[in-house]
Amino acid sequence: MNIGLIIALVAVLLVLVLGYNMILQYNAKIATAKKQEGARYIAVIDATEELIGHAHHMPFSKNLLLCLNNRILDAVQNMYELDPKNKQLEQRVEHVKQQIENLKTNFQSGESAAFKVPSNDKQAIVMLKLVKRLRDTIRNEHNKGRFDTEAYVAENARLETIQVRINIENVVKRSNDAIVRGQPGTAIQLLRKGLDVLSTKNDAYSAQAKEKLQAMYDDIEKRRQNQSASEQQQIVDKQREEDMDALFGEKKKW
């Protein structure tokens, strides 16, 4: 056989092998990228569903629930685009769409649950972290154009009010606990912090809360002043008694 032909065939074979390996590597790279992107969407869905799960424990508005469900829908649709043959994803897309339509049609006006005052500092911290996550989420959705500006502004203000309310209600509870323990100074410090927080707020809740905290503050200060005046009077009375004893006490017998 012609040596030149053999060399040519070997060269062609090498090119085919290299080309095949490049195709395999490219396909593997694409598969890895799709897998990573799919994992990112799954993380978004899990995190959003976890947020929605708190709707029974904290007041969620209709707009907030719609925003969160639309976030899930966007992630599921993107996953379906990555794997259009996946029938489960196709069904999931339709299921989420149906949930959104049900929300639009059946959600009653108002909020999903009544506000519950935190029973302790730990619970207050958990609630505050949840509100922060919700505010971060709706801001991201608004930035991506998936949450209407007017609805975003209203919802962000509502969540901010809830955030303030958690702080203030916790301040009131801690202040009352401090008073029961006989620590009026601690109660005064807590109430001052609460009033500082409310000083820049002008919504209806903040206005009522200011009056409540100021009344508590004034009452504690009045009692402290009365107690101080009583203690001073006791000191004066005792000193007067000692002076009288010194002047008119019984004379010693020698």
Image: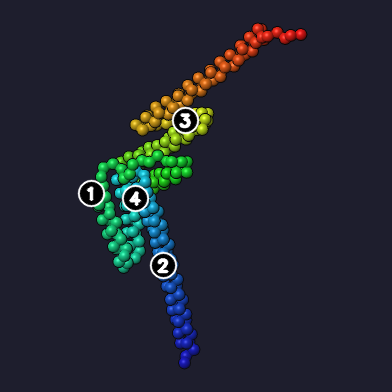
Precedes in sequence: disc 3 or disc 1: 1
For the residues labelled 4 and 1, the Cα–Cα distance comes to 16 Å
The disc labelled 3 sits on which kind of residue? Leu
Precedes in sequence: disc 1 or disc 2: 2
- Mark 4 or 1: the one toward you: 1
Q: In the drawing, does residue 121 fall left or right of residue 160? A: right
The disc labelled 4 sits on which kind of residue? Leu
Precedes in sequence: disc 2 or disc 3: 2
Q: Which residue is mark 3?
A: 191
For the residues labelled 2 and 4, the Cα–Cα distance comes to 29 Å
Q: What residue is drawn where x is 65% and y is 7%?
A: 248
Percent position of residue 22, x then y? 45, 72
Precedes in sequence: disc 2 or disc 4: 2
Query: Are dots 4 and 1 in contact, CB under 8 Å?
Result: no
Q: Which residue is mark 2?
A: 31
Q: What residue is drawn where x is 39% and y is 31%?
A: 209
Looking at the rendered structure, the secondary structure element under dot 2 is helix
